[in-house]
């Protein structure tokens, strides 16, 4: 599927990408977006319940039946009991980020925000829109390098766009360090299901901690169902704000997801999808030349994305060469809140079958080896 607009991309060459969409909409390889192709996305029937679901306004926190199922789901991941009243359902993870940005800025009067560098582009846009002063936490993410800030927005599992994954102990230390020093922490975690090693999700008990989960990557993105976990007191305040903003989350998606969860084994589905993605990555990495691998920051199994960089002087050449050869990539400029001195880019082969993966690998080797020889 080809997207004909790219929202929020702060790049002077974006008109080239738009031309790429228009001129090559039928034959382009879309390496820009991380999703599994349509035959692997879980089908979830849209249920129109006969009860009063469609004839009235509903619970601003989300339907209790669904929150019960999400509580069971999160409890199993975290190996601790989660109460439904510690959860609020949202219209997707993006809205969860948005409502937390409003809440922490307007209700808690927080202004200084820490981001990983690079960071999720939509989150950068949201926090900028609400007037946060941004600072960055850079690899290798040493705790002593943390700057003065009020709230941190971080991802610890299969980070977008870099794909980086914290080990369990470093993740725990980072969360505890932030919260013990009085900071607020938003953890955005749509890719946790890609762990296939029975890793335990660490959820600190704190009014200052907010965990964002989603059913887009693991089940179906069209549902637009996410959720926030926090203390009961913090969730109560978020529910009031959500009621003011949208009344309540989409009821049809909620009931459809609820019916799916009680009639299917979500854990097996997640495991199978993670294995499919891992197989596609292995297939891709088998064909990528060793020299080309050096462009990417990490090449172990790291989720949906590969994160590459080249000298800034080759930026226009790389973009134009990719467009001419029918490859769409996402320029990395959007994942930084201030100008950078290298050209970064993100690719994903998650929605390609084995035949297309081999074709894309051949093209990437040809184009990127030419760039490397130009250095």
Image (cartoon, grey):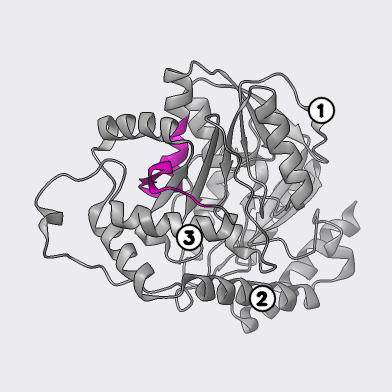
Q: Residue at x 80, y 40 (%)?
A: 139
Q: Relative to residue 152, is residue 139 drawn left or right?
A: right
The mark closer to the camera, 1 or 3, is 3
* The image quarter in which residue 209 lies: top right
Q: Which of the two labelled residues, at mark 1 and mark 3, occupies the earlier sequence position?
A: 3
Label 3 belongs to which residue?
73
Quarter of the rendering occupied by the N terminus: bottom left
How far apart are the two marked residues, 2 and 3, measured between alpha carbons? 27 Å
Please tell me the numbered disc located at residue 265: none
Q: Relative to residue 38, is residue 184 drawn left or right?
A: right
Q: Which of the two labelled residues, at mark 2 and mark 3, occupies the earlier sequence position?
A: 3
Q: Residue at x 69, y 27 (%)?
A: 180
Circle 3 packing at 10 Å, graded few (<14), some (14-19), many (20+), is some
Looking at the image, which residue sits at the far front? 81
Q: Which of the two labelled residues, at mark 1 and mark 2, occupies the earlier sequence position?
A: 1
The residue tagged with tag 3: helix, strand or loop? helix
Foreground residue, 96 or 280? 96
Label 2 belongs to which residue?
280
Please tell me the numbered disc located at residue 145: 1
Q: Which residues are the magenta region? A: 81-100
Foreground residue, 143 or 371? 143
Q: Position of residue 331 (x, y in %)?
A: 64, 48
């Amino acid at each position: 599927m080809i997207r004909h607009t790219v929202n929020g991309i702060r790049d002077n060459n974006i008109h080239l990408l738009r031309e790429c969409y228009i001129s090559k909409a039928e034959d382009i390889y879309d390496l820009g977006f991380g999703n599994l192709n349509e035959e692997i996305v879980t089908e979830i029937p849209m249920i129109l319940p006969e009860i009063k679901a469609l004839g009235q306004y509903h619970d601003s926190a989300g339907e209790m039946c669904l929150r019960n199922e999400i509580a069971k789901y999160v409890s199993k991941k975290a190996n601790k009991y989660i109460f439904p009243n510690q959860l609020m359902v949202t219209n997707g993870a993006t809205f969860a980020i948005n409502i937390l940005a409003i809440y922490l800025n307007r209700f808690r009067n927080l202004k200084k925000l820490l981001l990983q560098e690079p960071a999720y582009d939509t989150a950068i846009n949201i926090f900028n829109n609400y007037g946060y002063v941004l600072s960055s936490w850079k690899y290798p993410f040493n705790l002593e390098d943390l700057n003065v800030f009020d709230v941190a927005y971080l991802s610890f599992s299969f980070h977008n766009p870099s794909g980086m994954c914290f080990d369990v102990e470093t993740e725990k230390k980072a969360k505890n360090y932030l919260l013990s020093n009085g900071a607020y922490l938003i953890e955005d975690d749509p890719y946790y299901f890609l762990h296939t090693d029975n890793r335990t999700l660490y959820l600190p008990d704190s009014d200052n901690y907010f965990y964002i989960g989603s059913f887009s990557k693991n089940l179906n993105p069209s549902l637009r169902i996410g959720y926030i976990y926090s203390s009961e007191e913090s969730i109560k305040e978020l529910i009031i704000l959500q009621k003011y903003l949208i009344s309540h989350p989409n009821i049809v998606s909620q009931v459809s997801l609820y019916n799916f969860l009680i009639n299917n084994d979500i854990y097996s589905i997640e495991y199978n999808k993670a294995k499919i993605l891992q197989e596609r990555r292995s297939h891709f990495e088998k064909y990528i030349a060793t020299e080309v691998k050096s462009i990417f920051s990490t090449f172990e199994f790291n989720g949906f994305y590969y994160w590459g960089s080249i000298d800034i002087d080759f930026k226009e050449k790389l973009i134009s060469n990719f467009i001419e050869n029918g490859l769409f990539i996402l320029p990395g400029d959007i994942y930084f809140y201030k100008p950078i001195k290298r050209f970064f880019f993100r690719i994903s082969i998650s929605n390609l079958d084995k035949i297309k993966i081999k074709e894309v690998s051949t093209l990437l080797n040809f184009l990127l080896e030419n760039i490397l020889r130009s250095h």
